[in-house]
Amino acid sequence: MGTLALAIHGGCGVMAKLDLSEEEWAAARVDLGRALKAGWDVLTSGGAALDAVEAAVVVMEDSPHFNAGYGAALNTEGRHELDASIMDGRTLEAGAVTLVRRIRNPVKAARKIMEHGDALLLGGPAADAFAEQAGLAMVEPDYFTTERRTKALAAMKAHAAAGTAAKASEAEKHGTVGAVALDGEGHLAAATSTGGYNNKPDGRIGDTPIIGAGTYARDGACAVSGTGKGEYFMRYAVGHEVASRIAYLGESLEAAAAKVIQHDLKQHDVGAGLVAVGADGSITAPYNTDGMFRGWVTPEGDFYVATHAQVFHIQPE
Ligand code: ASP
């Protein structure tokens, strides 16, 4: 078996330490560890990178600590409209859903769409219906609602009324989850899932379901999953841009990702981060905000999770 690697994120932002209690930060780190373990177990048992990223994202979608699946953000109408995508770096096949309201794990629907093969991206009620027909678990829309997101929506509406929306804390605004992996056969994959940002316009679609923007994987180059203001990730085609810098300029994974996050997006004052894995198993997780929920497993099997600058070496449970 060749080199294995896995990295995940659970969104970036200002993440003021006082916004959450120590217990809540710790609980989020535990769920990052569980997501890593789910993905790593797939890789170490000879599974595909595609299965590993899906497994890791499902754990974070089911966790209330991240803005995807259970615990997703609410839009201006107080509704959840969820986006997700997945990409196989081996074949360049991809699948995505947007504006879905009833699929418990949107990343699983993205995978089913990819396998079905007719369309790459399905949206709205048709995507919900596709998932139901495919036998995926369906829920009532209020399944996704948590007290934290209801409060965040109220806070964002108050900011909007006072004309201070731009100053709202990043935690009030957005978040996303994602995973990237390299498997023992040398194949790369990426997956991303989000509720978008709090108080987003009804019908707004971000970068997460857009292949080449929020999610991208190509064998020989890299796999990328992003978090931050989706409009800019689309304008810079971030995932594809990182892969292109590696392929065309010969840049390292770290240099290519840093250029996009610390220069291209930062110059617009856009809070952004990503996780990426290279064809050689290199891992990078840059962000230009105060923190990013993130974690990775090195090719040696060492597990790391972090929310801010401090990185914790953990033992998977
Ligand atoms: N990228 C996501 C979106 O724009 C949100 C985020 O990651 O914060 O929908």
Image (cartoon, helix red, strand yellow):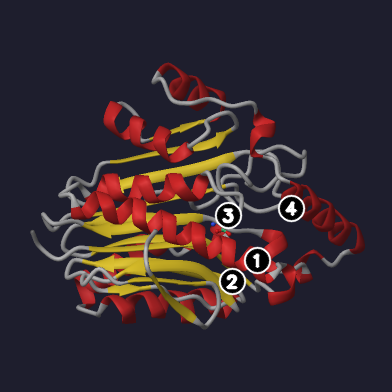
Q: CA distance from mark 2 to mark 1?
A: 25 Å
Decide which of 235, 256 is in the foreground and name it: 256
Marks 1 & 3, CB-CB < 8 Å contact = no
Q: Secondary structure at mark 4?
A: helix
Decide which of 269, 190 is in the foreground and name it: 190
Q: Amino acid at mark 2?
A: Gly
Marks 1, 3: nearer the viewer: 1
Residue 202: x and y in percent read 70, 40
Decide which of 230, 46 is in the foreground and name it: 46
Residue bearing mark 4:
148
Q: CA distance from mark 4 to mark 3?
A: 11 Å
Marks 2 & 4, CB-CB < 8 Å contact = no
| Residue behind label 2 places its C-beta within 8 angstroms of ligand 1 | yes
Marks 3 & 2, CB-CB < 8 Å contact = no
Q: Secondary structure at mark 2?
A: loop
Residue bearing mark 1:
23
Residue at 15% over, 49% down: 46
